[in-house]
Image (spheres, rainbow, N blue to C red):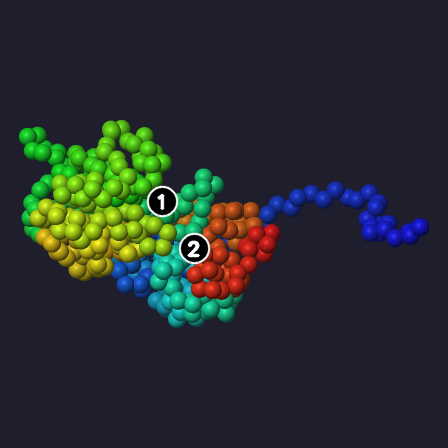
Amino acid sequence: MSSFSPFSKEELLPQEEMLEIKKQKGELFIGVPKETYLGEKRVCLTPDAVSALCAHGHRIVIETGAGENANYSDKEYAEAGAKISYDIEEAFKCNIVLKVAPPTQKEIEYMNPKAILISSLQLKTQQRKYFECIAKKKITAVSFDYIKDDHDTYPIVKSLSEIAGTASVLIAAELMSGTNKGNGLLLGNIGGVPPTSVVVFGAGTVGEYAVRTAIGLGARVKVFDNSITKLRKLQHSLSTPIYTSTLQPKSVAKALMRADVAIGAIRGKNRSPIVATEEMVANMKEGAIIIDVSIDRGGCFETSNVTTHAAPTFVKHGVVHYCVPNILARYSRTASLSISNIFTPYLLNIAEEGGFENAARFNKSLRNGMYFYHGVLTNRTVADWFNLPYRDINLLIL
């Protein structure tokens, strides 16, 4: 009989009890560069967030002018404890880089090897070269629009969608005035005057907040979506009953003929479905307004074409179209506050856990948002889109 044992004699003897060692809090070195993407006016951290992080002993470098488009001055950031840098590269040389738009390939070159990047991904606008640059630098990259919390929701995406939904109705109200090629109607319900009619395509978060805002102003609202579950959920969440329907062409055409405002908020998997044909738009009222929030995915209206903040509208078939992809930049301060309020607890948690590695190990939402880990692609969607090899993050980090 073999005397082989997988354990040594020392291992079989009673061992001393090992006490859990308290995690050493980590000091974060965070850089916030100025956004260079056309039309991007948001910033990841507000001065109040910087003050909270600096109070916990973290160092923050803000590139000069990073917050000016959201009406935050360099002076406010400096008084909050940040270092204001006039060197374009300095903020990118920090261990953690926070951006709203993904960095350009040149900006990735500024970053240190094995740094941590937290930004949006904007997959539809990316090229294979972008991912090759990140892999070469062995960067760990987290997309904030992929971060999913314990409630199975995407907190930043949801918050920004709420702003976009509310904004769509406020922009429509502004465009309806006679000075903006609109029909001169007030979006609301005035005694003795028929209420304005608003049609919303999509019962998701954007659609819900568009509906809430329109009802709040006194408009008569109709909502279309092919998800009965979403329509039912929306009905139950409102204090007043509204018209809801699936996307039946005859019903859609009839609703659009009577509409003063139509809002497109259906996303789809790859491209937003076209729910309103050119013929339907041509039959709308003269001076009616279309706000296509889904234009970043192709748009819900067949007549939609991408516009910019500098020239936000065009008129087709007598209908005013607003098709700006980055609608949130119009309300950059509110959007910045929203992003910052969600970012700050994550950053404090990373420090509390002793660094990003530990935080990602125990925080599933961070792992959900990660698409590169030390230069290794960990997101299947990105891998499939660009035909790149990937590894499961749970096998790499645990």
Residue at image position (25%, 39%) is 223
Where does the image place residue 70, in percent across and percent down from the top left?
Answer: 27, 54
Instruction: For mark 1, give the secondary structure.
Output: helix
In front of the other: 112 or 320: 320
Q: Would residue 242 appear left or right of 18 to someone viewing this image?
A: left
Quadrant assignment, res 393? bottom right
- Residue that mark 2 sits on: 143
Where does the image place residue 342, in percent across and percent down from the top left?
Answer: 40, 46
Q: Is residue 190 above or below residue 59?
A: above
Label 1 CA crowd tier, 10 Å (few <14, some 14–19, many 20+) = some
- Residue that mark 1 sits on: 158
**Residue type beneath disc 2:** Ser
Quadrant assignment, res 39? bottom left
Residue at image position (91%, 52%) is 2
**Residue farthest toward the front in the current orientation of the protein:** 250
Q: CA distance from mark 1 to mark 2?
A: 14 Å
In front of the other: 61 or 7: 7
Residue at image position (44%, 64%) is 386
Where does the image place residue 317, in percent across and percent down from the top left?
Answer: 11, 54
Q: Would residue 102 appear left or right of 57 to someone viewing this image?
A: left
Instruction: For mark 2, give the secondary structure.
Output: strand
